[in-house]
Image (cartoon, rainbow, N blue to C red):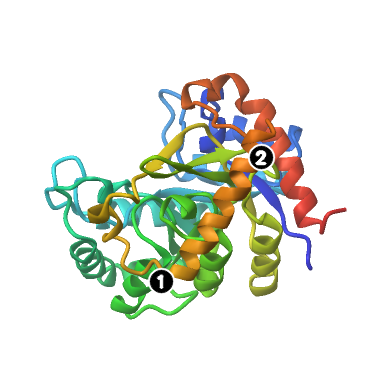
Amino acid sequence: MRKLKVGVDSYSLKPLDLSPFEALEWAVLNGAEGVQFSEINVPPGTALDRTFLQDLRGFARENDLYVEWGGGEHIPLDLATGRPKDIFAGNRRAAEQAFQLGSASVRSCSGGLMRWKADAPSTEDYLELMAAALREQKPMFRDHGVILAIETHFEFTSFELLRLFDMCGAAPGEYLGICLDTMNLLTMLEDPVLATRRLLPWIVTTHIKDGGLALTADGFVSFTAEAGKGVIDLTAIVEALAAAHPRITLTVEDHGGDFPIPTNDPEFLARFPDLTVPELVSLLRLSVRTRALMDAGKLSVLPRERWASVCEARVKRDIRSVRRVAAGGE
């Protein structure tokens, strides 16, 4: 297995309030080989213009760091109001910025947890709206040599994203792809290894994040875990990624928090029509392993409000753990 580069997502370091240059410096000092900028913390009075982006690109090159960009959108709705939203201009701006940085992708994460809301549009409605908007953006992304990397977030399952790509008439490596968040898959009732295999041709960037899945009175609860401490088979995922995409980067993302999944509610469960019995059995196996680790005091939910106090030390350990996985356990 070719050793993949391991970096960090800027969201993981949000409590440190780092500028883009400071985030790259943090990477150099702490053994990360790149930064994916899920959010861009530009100092007051600083323009995110061509000069700034090219200077950032130069700094990354001098320090042999990769840079991946964010700021993309894929849902043409204001999720707070439900009103139509033009996402073309924002995506073009993000694609232009990525081009200046020499990044081949733009991460897109437009919201989440929609099917947790009874009054939200149906998933099929979302898919049709997205397909109509994204089909029109194909020439723009191709002109910039940039792929819109839709994160596996709390919005759509792997099955639904594959349907979206089919509705857009897209092919892998063309203009639409996946930012694989390994832990978020649990929240969408997907076994992370199985979902990775389903999405494999489309994956262009990653959020490597461990987690747990516990049974509750209402169904499940998913939560983040320090890399190597949870129940996600990161080794199997990294091996699959390396075999299919020898130059893909492994970007560590981590944070606190947990996410209730009320699968005991038949109405909620019906919103996951692609969930099969074999995959549900896989999730139950993961929940058994989670409970065993929790009972042994080796795994617990980290409240989101505690993240600021532990983030830097934990992310450093995350990076070291994922680097060991990338090196084949050396």
On the rendered structure, is 20 left or right of 64? left
Question: Residue shown at 43%/50% (left/top)?
Answer: 187
24 or 229, which lies in front? 229
Residue on which disc 2 sits: 293
Q: Could you say which disc has been placed on residue 217 in the image?
A: none
Question: Residue shown at 80%/50% (left/top)?
Answer: 324
Query: Can residue 86 be seen at all in this image of the molecule?
Result: yes
> Rounded to the nearest whole Å, what is the CA distance between mark 1 and mark 2?
46 Å
Q: In the picture shown, does residue 46 fall above or below 287? A: above
Residue 66 image position (x, y, % from top left): 64, 51
What type is the residue that disc 2 sits on? Leu
Which element is circle 1 on? helix
Which element is circle 2 on? helix
What type is the residue that disc 1 sits on? Arg
Q: In the picture shown, does residue 299 fall above or below 66? A: above
10 Å neighbourhood of mark 1: few (<14), some, or many (≥20)?
Answer: some
Q: In the picture shown, does residue 328 fall above or below 224? A: below
52 or 152, which lies in front? 152
On the rendered structure, is 1 left or right of 77? right
Residue 280 image position (x, y, % from top left): 46, 62
Question: Residue shown at 46%/46% (left/top)?
Answer: 50
Outermost residue to the front: 217
Residue 56 image position (x, y, % from top left): 58, 42
The quadrant in which residue 27 appears is top right
Query: Can residue 25 be seen at all in this image of the molecule?
Result: no
The quadrant in which residue 298 appears is top right
214 or 12, which lies in front? 214
Residue 206 image position (x, y, % from top left): 56, 55
Residue on which disc 1 sits: 142
On the rendered structure, is 9 left or right of 305? right
Of the 4 image quadrants, the one containing the N terminus is bottom right
10 Å neighbourhood of mark 2: few (<14), some, or many (≥20)?
Answer: some
